[in-house]
Amino acid sequence: MKLKLSACLMLFSLLVFSQENYTISGTVKDDANGELVFGASVFLENTSVGGITNAYGFYSLTAPKGTYNIMVSYLGYTTIKQEVVLDANQSLVFELKEDTTSLDEVVITAEESEKANIRDPQMGVSLIKSATIKQIPAVLGEVDVVKSIQMLPGVTNNGEGSNGFNVRGGAVDQNLVLLDEAIIFNESHLFGFFSVFNADVIKDVKLYKGNIPANYGGRVSSVLDIRQKDGNSKDFELNGGIGLISSRLSAEGPLFKSKGSFILAGRSSYAHLFLKLADQDNTAYFYDFNAKGSYEINQNNRLYLSGYFGRDVLNFDDAFANSYGNTTFNLRWNHVFNDKLFSNLSFIYGDYNYQIEIGFIGLDWTSSIKNMNAKYDFKYYLSNKTTIDFGASAIHYNFNPGDVKPIDEDSSINEFILDKKRALEAGLYANVEHKLSDKLNVQAGLRFSMFNRLGGQPIATYTNDQPVVYNADLGIYEEGTKTGDVDYDKSESIANFSNFEPRLGLAYQLSENSSVKLGYSRVAQYLHLLSNTANATPLDVWTPSGSFIDPQMANQYSAGYFKELVDGKFSIETEVYYKTVDNRIDYIDGSNLIANNNIETQILQGESRAYGLEFLFRKNKGKFTGWLAYTLSKSEQKTPGGNAGGPGINKGDWYNTPFDRTHDISLTGSYKLTDKWSFSGNFIFQTGRPVTYPVGQYEYEGLSIAVYDQRNANRLPSYNRLDLAATFKPNRKPDARWKGEWVFSIYNAYNRKNAASISFGQNLETGVNEATRTAIFGIVPSVTYNFKF
């Protein structure tokens, strides 16, 4: 018996030894420029062992001892196949070469690996490559990241000339926009005509609109994560473009004997110069500057330093002047502890500020938001079935709502300073992705967020703790009766909040080419954008949660079906979602938000809900590529009177948010005719934006006064537009350093006069109320010359 037991133990030991596991780890780079590749597929042939490179090109695979063929692939590049003898842990760096025999392809996909989109439990996420963005026609010839994502299902805007974007019925302030991890509070130039993101320096764009991963927090609708290029670490390179109203130039190259790299880019508009030639004093232009450097200390340590500075300047005949912009810096340290543990430590600074001068009243107003952010993220490759992400972050905010002073001695404005506000937001998170079986993958995450509204300012008190009260006699909401102030030192806390934010995603693979997914996320948002206009403007004020303003809390449920057809040539993605948001701000009728030190007297908090169906059909390969996106959705809000009493806004009933779009259709396509000529176009149709029209009028002292009923019960006319572009690449030698192309584009090809707004007023001659329709753009042709050296 003992002999049998010994034999069994020996056999078991041999089996364990024979199954000894080893790990292959390393990075994947672009052979042409040394850029780290995010989303490359790395797997062992004829096994289930595989993975995707992270945002810094790192991968890790673990398998039993043996001889394998390792396969490394990425869309548009030649697949690498290399034999490896796995008898010890080893590090391998792969450099992918562009597949020059393949046709140019326009692709939007959840992950660059075709099968990863089927198996990945992450929902509501889209990755857009820089090459895709550059092929989409844009207004005035300037390619645009923000306008590109608006071609995706579930993403809209508030019309031409509007800032920002809206995701799944959410407001602009509910989107977290990151540029190399730094927060961008206003992503628009010239009030939405351009975005602050220069496509020449963008590596990739990732939009999360559904099950937001646990490492992100602070916004309840979406995360737009934009990463800049690291710079060419092999050769010096110039890129640029010359357009009718703006131009750009970027330079990149190696540093420290190719152990590092840099990229510098500048961009500016100059349409205002033509106004000067026409003897007009009006000015409207922007400029921005991007910079990034990297240095590889050794195989396990890499440093990055990146920054952005942008500015808009507007001046209208010295009667109105406005200047605003973003400044960001980020110092990052990538460290590989071992073949299974990867980390990224970041120190980030951000500043969004603006200044307004109104000449005819003598007003000079400056405001800013500064933030300091430290975050430490880890990724642990526990096994081929399990990966764990975890980390912590802390952000310190300094809000300066406004310093107001007179422009000159003749001004009627008195100098005053609005109360500055400070806050600290922190978060801890962990996220686990585990392969339960060959068909079922699960992703479970938990974020614990904390928010401390710091002291250093007085906080008003009100009778019955009511900053807003309902006047039943007049049927309106009014400011509450202020009873005094409570002074808080900087060492004191005004208010504290904390929340657990669970996230869950499931993916069940029905077949090799199809799957169904389920997702849930709970997200807290502690900052609020105060704006009682349909579109966000540089005048809008951000404020933190505090004594009278609770954080927004969102719960989103989603389900989807994903299928690939004809070996990935076509694909279908369908998702349904239902989202609720508690403590959503809305404004009492006649609210005054400008230079108001007690903003709580102008607002009520309610709830919102949004639900819809999203459909995306893509053609990924061939001479013609593109996608069709359709969204059927509803976005509503309800704001009862609450502690203020009264019926609330819109009698406490549900009403359309300004971001509600019943139907949203976008069609994008690109066709490569020859090596010289390619063509692209996009068509957009949207249900008109909700607005409030008058339902009647009455006369008072000879004036005709409009009467309004339900909020947002009417709509602007439907929005539709067709854009076209043609790209011509002249003859050039294959080995020529200088490469150029001409891009001819037509924005709004059939000259549709889309209504940006409809206003109502009294005709002073006839005394009759009348409607005035305002359109921003008609047809806009443009030409741009792009070059690379």
Image (cartoon, helix red, strand yellow):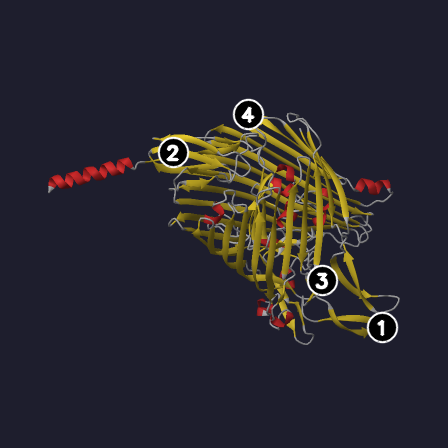
Mark drawn on residue 716:
3
Which mark lies nearer to you, 2 or 3?
Answer: 2
Which mark lies nearer to you, 4 or 2?
Answer: 2
Above/below status of 2 relative to 776:
above
Three-letter code for the amino acid on which mark 3 is drawn? Leu
Residue pointed to by mark 4: 258
The x and y percentages for residue 175 are 59, 52
For the residues labelled 3 and 1, the Cα–Cα distance comes to 30 Å
Mark drawn on residue 702:
1
Please tell me how crowded label 4 is: few (under 14), some (14-19), or many (20+) other residues with Cα within 10 Å. some
The residue positioned farthest toward the left in the image shown: 1
Three-letter code for the amino acid on which mark 2 is drawn? Tyr
Q: Secondary structure at mark 3?
A: loop
For the residues labelled 4 and 3, the Cα–Cα distance comes to 56 Å
Above/below status of 390 relative to 685:
above
Q: Which comes sooner in the sequence, label 2 or label 1?
A: 2
Which mark lies nearer to you, 3 or 1?
Answer: 3
Q: Which comes sooner in the sequence, label 4 or label 2?
A: 2
Residue pointed to by mark 2: 68
Three-letter code for the amino acid on which mark 4 is drawn? Ser
Q: Which comes sooner in the sequence, label 3 or label 1?
A: 1
The x and y percentages for residue 22 are 35, 35
Three-letter code for the amino acid on which mark 1 is drawn? Gly
| Nearest the eye: 123 or 530 | 123
Could you tell whether 374 is left or right of 735 in the image?
left
The x and y percentages for residue 52 are 47, 41
| Nearest the eye: 737 or 520 | 737
Could you tell whether 316 is left or right of 238 in the image?
right
